[in-house]
Image (cartoon, rainbow, N blue to C red):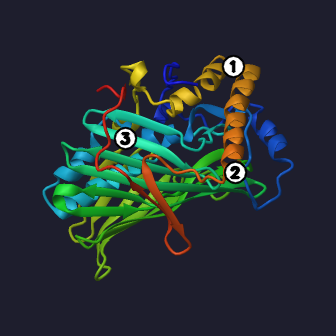
Amino acid sequence: MNANSNAVLTAPLSLEGDNSDGPPNMLQRIFRLLSSVHSGSDLIRLQLPPLFNLPKSQLQCYGESVYCTKTDMLSKCNNGETPLDRFISVIAWSISTTRPLIFGVAPYNPILGETHHVSRGTLNVLLEQVSHHPPVTALHATDEKENIEMIWCHSPIPKFYGTHIETEVHGKRQLNLLDKNETYVMNSPKLVIRFLPVPGVEWLGNVTIQCKETGLEAEICYEGNSFFPRRSMHRSIKGKIFLSSSSQTLYKINGHWDSTVTIKDVSSERVTIIYNAKEAISGLKTPIVKDQKGILPSESTVIWAEVSQAILQKCWEKAKEAKSVVEEKQRELAKERKLKDENWVPKHFTVSHSKESGWECLPNHKLVPPTPIVVTP
């Protein structure tokens, strides 16, 4: 597919997009799909039929969590008057990247070298799939006006455990407030897809946010239902903000990431709302294409355009054929590289890996350029 092919963009995941029940027979189809998979098995190489796919790539899902928000939460991170103000804003922004997922469907596994490039105002976001086995996605976002830079490196590792699939997201997220000389480092919660007793999708686990320059740190626990559903536990988060040097707790964090999150000052008992999901991630706008010819041929929305269009039209055989074409082309390119004894090199990132530090993805350029795909206010 070339750069002149029409990109297909779909609505971003938001509060309105949640449909955790799924189609009535979805659970039965999933069990048939996983019937040959053993408990504890690595699902990285499992290829889903289009019937189980969202009409978008995983790169788009990562990118949407950065460029699709109703309010400009990133600018607020940089504009806080004190280090504590900025740190609290970073926590709120980090929570906003958590989006409701739909039970029974998943995005496409990105192909090697696939990119996704979107602009929102002065914020430019670029993602690249820098490894296929294991899957590793790199993200670089810059806002020259606000002096903000973001660098992510994600490597999701899904495993099947009989009644559920658990995906640990290895790698780190880094947010740099350049004019403040502050770097915030954080990880991601893990994704759990439950089949029994009640089907559903949850973000679970511990997230740590740390700023060494200010000595501030936060621990946030994403909680959910361990077995039977309880409204009080559904999508709840708890945590604290403390000083790294002394472990002195400054604030306690409480709430639900799909509604509101508060902090309570431990000294004054004052409670403040720091995040409102309805204000941040409801009614999100779909990006638009301003210049079709300026889109990279490696762009997600171009590579998967025919597959996405067929899924939207519920033409499953056509979607299956189009998806097979994309995947077969990648297998042929991999064979060619092997015959030539060539290693694939990412275009936009320098990538390294070690047992000690895991995956590191450093951008090759200081700034991300604007793109023809934009999110309008």
**Is 16 situated above or below 216?**
above
- Looking at the image, tell me whether mark 1 or mark 3 is earlier in sequence order: 3
Q: CA distance from mark 1 to mark 2?
A: 37 Å
- Residue at 52 percent of width and 22 percent of height: 8
Binning the other alpha carbons within 10 Å of mark 3 as few (below 14), some (14 to 19) or many (20 upward) gives many
Binning the other alpha carbons within 10 Å of mark 2 as few (below 14), some (14 to 19) or many (20 upward) gives few
Tell me if 1 is positioned left or right of 176 in this view. Answer: right
Q: Which residue is mark 3?
A: 125
Q: CA distance from mark 3 to mark 2?
A: 32 Å
- Looking at the image, tell me whether mark 1 or mark 2 is earlier in sequence order: 1
**Camera-side mark, 3 or 2:** 2
Which amino acid type corresponds to the residue marked 2 in the rendered image? Lys
Residue in the foreground of this view, choosing between 69 and 110: 110
Residue in the foreground of this view, choosing between 194 and 123: 123
Q: Which residue is mark 1?
A: 314
Which amino acid type corresponds to the residue marked 1 in the rendered image? Lys
**Camera-side mark, 1 or 3:** 3
Report which quarter residue 156 is drawn in: bottom right
Which amino acid type corresponds to the residue marked 3 in the rendered image? Val
Q: CA distance from mark 1 to mark 3?
A: 30 Å
